[in-house]
Amino acid sequence: MSRKSVKVAVTGAAGQIGYSLLFRLASGEVFGPDTKVSLHLLEITPALPALEGVVMELDDCAFPLLENVVVTDNAETAFDGINWALFVGSKPRGAGMERGDLIRENGPIFVGQGRALSKAASDARVLVVGNPANTNCLIAMNNSDLPEERFGALTRLDQNRAYAQLAQKAGVPVSAVSNVTIWGNHSATQYPDAENAKINGKPAMEVITDHDWLRGEFISTVQKRGAAVIAARGKSSAASAANAALDHVMSFESKTPDGHWFSAAVPSDGSYGIEKGLIFSFPVVSDGAGGYSIVQGLQLSEFAKEKVVATEQELKDEKSVVTDLLR
Ligand code: NDP
């Protein structure tokens, strides 16, 4: 999709992911060298001074394509006339907090942001990064008048991690890997599907003959990669998360090459028997003009079906914790 200018809102813009995201958005890398970029940065009030520091650095990059920067703690101001909303900000998990507590803590933020979107933006596409991303997205979608197909949550980092693991195992460059799908929730129940993946155009299951690895260590490595990065670096995987968010945006902005697909959590239309309306990661193709569809007809083995049912069940359970926040 080519535009003369694009307005992108980023919430939690003073955070770690924001710091890896904003400069690449402003550089023109995402929307192309002919598209001017306005950044609408939302933060909670106490984080506004830190955000001012980030804006100083944006100024100091003198990006020719960066037309305007809005800094605010008001969601409607941030979302005014935007084309993309990247919902990065969310409350982190506190000590002793269960996933259900985290969902309840974050719910009101996404109710408010969904409502603000309805008031301020008529043509926005939304990507939720802040965790628990799928259910935060479900809440925002249910509190907004924007069409449901404008909403998505990030599973592209999981996909990218799966590509890297398969390429390393097969001893090929990452560009030789294609058609990997992440099914379900961005959580430990996600199912990274190598059964439908290809390596140099051949079924990955033929190229990698260690099927125990594909059904065991491969899946758990992808599922636990975030924790492994924290253990090694002492900080979370913010740069690769930001990179994946930009990959997600670029994939929806461009036409997916024939025979390929990418993974994104989008509202289920009932495909593959998944409950309608859940924000579920599927194989997706974009038409490059604002539309997308879920790839149909992929074969799932009994092993895969069990995994898909388990991640769907987790999303149903998460939904049941926030029914009062849904319309
Ligand atoms: P990060 O920028 O590191 O992360 C932001 C969110 O992205 C978290 O929910 C995090 O989940 C999630 N995330 C998804 N995938 C990844 C990944 N691979 N690696 C790391 N994070 C991932 O958090 P910070 O704390 O640095 O910044 C958050 C900012 O959001 C703060 O500046 C805060 O002020 C702001 N905020 C804004 C709100 C708002 O706009 N209303 C509300 C609350 C906070 P996880 O925690 O699971 O790592």
Image (cartoon, rainbow, N blue to C red):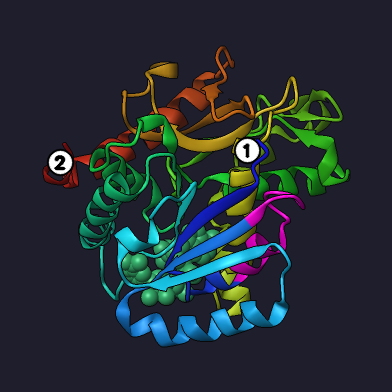
Within 10 Å of the Cα at label 1, are there few (<14), some (14-19), or many (20+) other Cα atoms? some
List the residue tagged with mark 1: 253
Q: Amino acid at mark 1?
A: Glu
Q: Is residue 10 visible?
A: yes
At x 37%, y 46%, the residue is 121
Give the Cα separation between the discs numbered 2 and 1: 32 Å
Q: Which residues are drawn in magenta?
A: 20-36
Residue at image coords 87%, 46%: 173
Q: Is residue 92 visible?
A: no
| Contact, mark 2 vs mark 1 (Cβ under 8 Å) | no
Measured as percent of width and height from the top left, residue 257 is found at 75, 26
Q: Which residue is mark 2?
A: 323
| Between 26 and 299, the one nearer to me in the picture | 26
Left or right of 136: which side holds 108? left
Q: Position of residue 74 (x, y in %)?
A: 30, 67
- Mark 1 and ligand 1: say if the CB distance to the nearest ligand atom is below 8 Å: no
Q: Quadrant of residue 64?
A: bottom right
Q: Mark 2 or mark 1, which has the lower sequence index? A: 1
| Residue 167 image offset from top left, x and y in percent | 80, 44
